Image (spheres, rainbow, N blue to C red):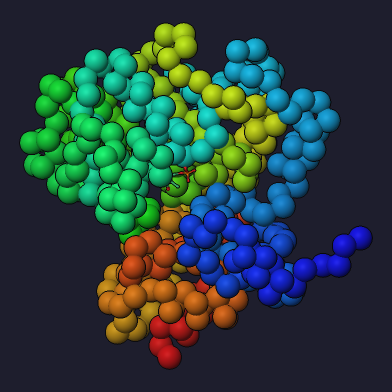
């Protein structure tokens, strides 16, 4: 057996050999269980990163692991041009849990791929070119998805991007009314803006945008990549608002941590012509089996309900912290942001020192996306640690 690497060994190797695109946190994780993770030196953390909102069912989930192990022994790969049992069952399952009106799905391997596919489908079926997206929105890093992503630092070095994209302020229906025309193929929105700072959409806004799209013949694309699979207290955040998108992008938590994305497709799009899109790994039996087990677990354990309860506890706890450094606490379910009046980075580092891992969402927001299986006691610990670091 190889000698186990220490945290500093791991960091030295990655710093030397990784391409370097990630701003690294000085933590080397090697194991997880539920809402806890451990570094290579045996230090324990409560994980409010969850692999960027991926581990909704918790780390090392036995039900998901068992499904993966069983599928490994049967079939890992099967191209989308050949039928497969796990894929058939997953497609049926996805449609059955999706908001009403979504009837079919395209399977891929990540969030950004789901967004790319949705844009292609929208242009194809409407014959129109324009896509309207929101300021502060995040939809991914490949050229199409990046063209709908707001942050200048992400976009500018790679211009020219895909033409036809326009940005409007989030939660401003009047500005959306000006932007959506008979040339608009689609509007894409997050229900709760995640990377942009954890901003929930207002119900009248989201429903108003949906109506506007219907009136003007544009498709309404909802990006549920971060909000989906129980995160916000419903299986999909659309359900809080009664939304019926034409295209819904999902990924992150869908397959318990294995890479997978999907676009759910509504009646206004319908079945697509042969060969207009596709990919090699999308809908592979291994990820489909993992996704089926993940969704089954989310339903059996009623994780959306638990996210609502633990999320309310987390929000209330954070809101009760008396710190002059806090500007606002906001969120939905277990997607919670604490906006500071100063940079969040040093406080996130201090929090990690105290055994709680959390994310940023823009420069001044601390973001909490724990596994939905996190316990009430663990939430209490998170709140206590946040209070400590914001009051030193
Ligand atoms: C993470 C995320 C994406 C991109 O997903 P990847 O799997 O990283 O490509 C797109 N949209 C939203 C809202 C996200 O949170």
Residue 253 shown left or right of residue 294 in the figure: left
Find ligand 1 in the image and state its quadrant: top left
Q: Quadrant of residue 187?
A: top left
Residue 244 shown left or right of residue 348 in the figure: left
Q: Position of residue 299 (x, y in %)?
A: 59, 39
Q: Residue furthest top?
A: 274
Q: Quadrant of residue 205?
A: top left
Residue 390 shown left or right of residue 207 in the figure: right
Residue at image location 22% in from the left, 24% down from the top: 129
Query: Looking at the image, which is closer to me, 21 or 109?
Result: 21
Query: Looking at the image, which is closer to me, 355 or 282?
Result: 282
Residue at image location 45% in from the left, 19% down from the top: 277
Q: Residue furthest front?
A: 16
The C terminus lies in which quarter of the figure?
A: bottom left
Q: Residue furthest right?
A: 1
Q: Position of residue 9 (x, y in %)?
A: 71, 71
For residue 353, above or below residue 7? below
Q: Residue furthest bottom?
A: 392
Q: Position of residue 191 (x, y in %)?
A: 33, 44
């Amino acid at each position: 057996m190889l000698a186990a690497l220490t945290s500093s060994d791991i960091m030295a190797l990655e710093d030397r050999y990784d391409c370097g695109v990630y701003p690294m946190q000085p933590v080397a994780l090697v194991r997880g269980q539920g809402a806890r993770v451990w570094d290579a030196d045996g230090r324990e953390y409560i994980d409010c990163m969850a692999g960027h909102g991926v581990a909704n069912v918790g780390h090392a989930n036995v039900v998901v692991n068992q499904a993966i192990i069983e599928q490994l022994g049967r079939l890992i790969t099967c191209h989308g041009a050949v039928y497969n049992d796990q894929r058939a069952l997953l497609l049926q399952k996805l449609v059955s849990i999706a908001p009403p009106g979504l009837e079919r799905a395209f399977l891929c391997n990540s969030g950004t791929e789901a967004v790319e596919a949705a844009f292609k489908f929208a242009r194809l079926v409407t014959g129109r070119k324009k896509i309207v997206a929101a300021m502060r929105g995040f939809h991914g890093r490949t050229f199409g998805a990046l063209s709908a992503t707001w942050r200048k630092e992400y976009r500018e070095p790679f211009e020219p991007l895909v033409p036809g994209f326009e940005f409007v302020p989030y939660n401003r229906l009047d500005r959306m009314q000006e932007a959506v025309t008979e040339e608009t193929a689609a509007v894409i929105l997050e229900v709760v803006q995640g990377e942009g700072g954890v901003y929930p959409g207002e119900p009248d806004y989201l429903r108003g945008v949906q109506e506007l799209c219907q009136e003007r013949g544009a498709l309404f694309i909802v990006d549920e990549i971060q909000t989906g699979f129980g995160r916000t207290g419903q299986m999909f955040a659309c359900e809080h608002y009664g939304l019926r998108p034409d295209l819904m992008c999902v990924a992150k938590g869908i397959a318990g941590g294995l890479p997978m994305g999907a676009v759910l497709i509504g009646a206004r799009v319908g079945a697509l012509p042969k060969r207009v899109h596709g990919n090699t790994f999308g809908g592979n039996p291994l990820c489909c089996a993992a996704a089926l087990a993940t969704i089954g677990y989310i339903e059996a354990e009623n994780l959306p309900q638990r996210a609502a309860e633990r999320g309310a506890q987390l929000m209330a706890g954070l809101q009760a912290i008396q710190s002059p450094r806090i500007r606002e606490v906001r969120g939905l379910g277990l997607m919670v942001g604490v906006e500071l009046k100063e940079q969040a980075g040093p406080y996130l580092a201090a929090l990690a020192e105290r055994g709680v891992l959390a994310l940023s969402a823009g420069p001044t927001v601390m973001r909490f996306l724990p596994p939905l299986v996190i316990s009430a006691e663990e939430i209490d610990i998170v709140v206590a640690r946040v209070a400590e670091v914001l009051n030193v």
